[in-house]
Amino acid sequence: MDANSKTDEHASLSWEDRPSTCPDFVVSFRGYEQEAAETLGAAIGETLRAFGRIMDISNLDGVTVGYDYDEALAQLDRGYETNFVLERTNGVAIGVAMTPSVLRGESLKSHIVLAGHIADALVGNDVELRSMTVHTIAHECSHVEITAAWEKCFPGELLRTRFPTLLTAWRSEVTSACWDEYAACRISADLGYDPVPGYTQTFLTIFSGIDKKVGELVGGFDGTNVDQLVGSLFGAVGDLMKFACYLQGALAGTGRKLDDVPDASSALSAHWFSPYFDRLADACNEIFSEFGRWPDKRQFEVISDLVVEIIEDQAVTIWDHEDGSYSVRIHHPRLFL
């Protein structure tokens, strides 16, 4: 099943002739002159209507474009009371676009936020930059579809569910990040430009530092704040898994295998993460094969079990108690000797 056919009820039509799922929406601009905003807004609308013919973006709430991307994220009306402030990815990969969930009345929708310098390339003369922006918008449209599919299968959960324990929250965060990015990268893989080289570089950067990162977290533990240690381990291992999913999704979406990326294949060879990389790809592929038809969350729990398995294999054993608390035992595998 390819990404373009999984929800398309008009498969016999060429994509140009299919009706668009793009709803009426507003593009809001921050820091733009009116003429520039009108020109870019028209281009964004045309692009989204085109992508609406090959994926379901009917749950799009709107688009915000801002030169001050951080402020645009922070000021987005999410439709409910929260102290959580949206922040861009800021590390090995620098975030330039995000599609957070929002509530509009009782309806869950998705709102695309774009950094102005990225969005501007859509109407610029640089062909390479324009293709990258087209791909970025396609990726964010994919998130609109993915979120809607989750809401259809598990209504009322996103933004409206409290996790009973910290371990449950950490597991869920990693699972959501891995699945969402795998699916978005797979759906948008062949739209705009080829993202595989960039995803490969980012994954290898995270991958090359994971042993040191986990070792520092364990070595720096002072025996008092267990939540900080365990939460940080979920964060570090979760990032490794998430960026593996970026690469895996893009490879699957373009019909390639890991062997087609020699740098990544060579780096993973004989490394402890190699079997986990393969199992993660298999888990995501299995979930994708049932896109939007998930009867329960058992397939997703494979990912959450995997992150715990990696942490326990490489750093600490975790005991989850019936009362919601947990305890850990730090061990010293060959990785840290």
Image: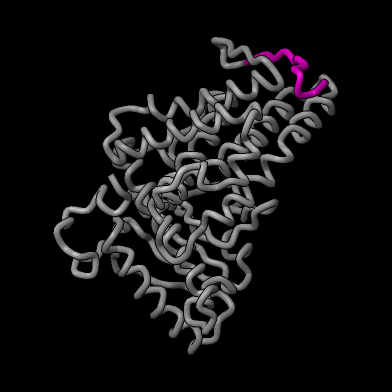
Q: Which residues are magenta?
A: 326-337
Say left or right for 123 vs 237: left
The location of residue 173, given as percent across then percent down, is 54, 36
Q: Is residue 44 magenta?
A: no
Front residue (pair 203, 8): 203
The location of residue 41, given as percent across then percent down, is 42, 78
Quadrant assignment for the C terminus: top right
Residue in the picture at 81% in, 31% down: 216
Residue in the picture at 49% in, 32% down: 280
Residue in the picture at 29% in, 55% down: 56
Residue in the picture at 63% in, 70% down: 68
Specify how the rendered protein is coloured: one colour
| Number of numbered labels in the structure image | 0
Front residue (pair 335, 232): 335
- Residue at the bottom extreme? 35
The location of residue 159, given as percent across then percent down, is 45, 42
Can you say whether 82 is above or below 74 in the image? above
Can you say whether 267 is above or below 228 in the image? below
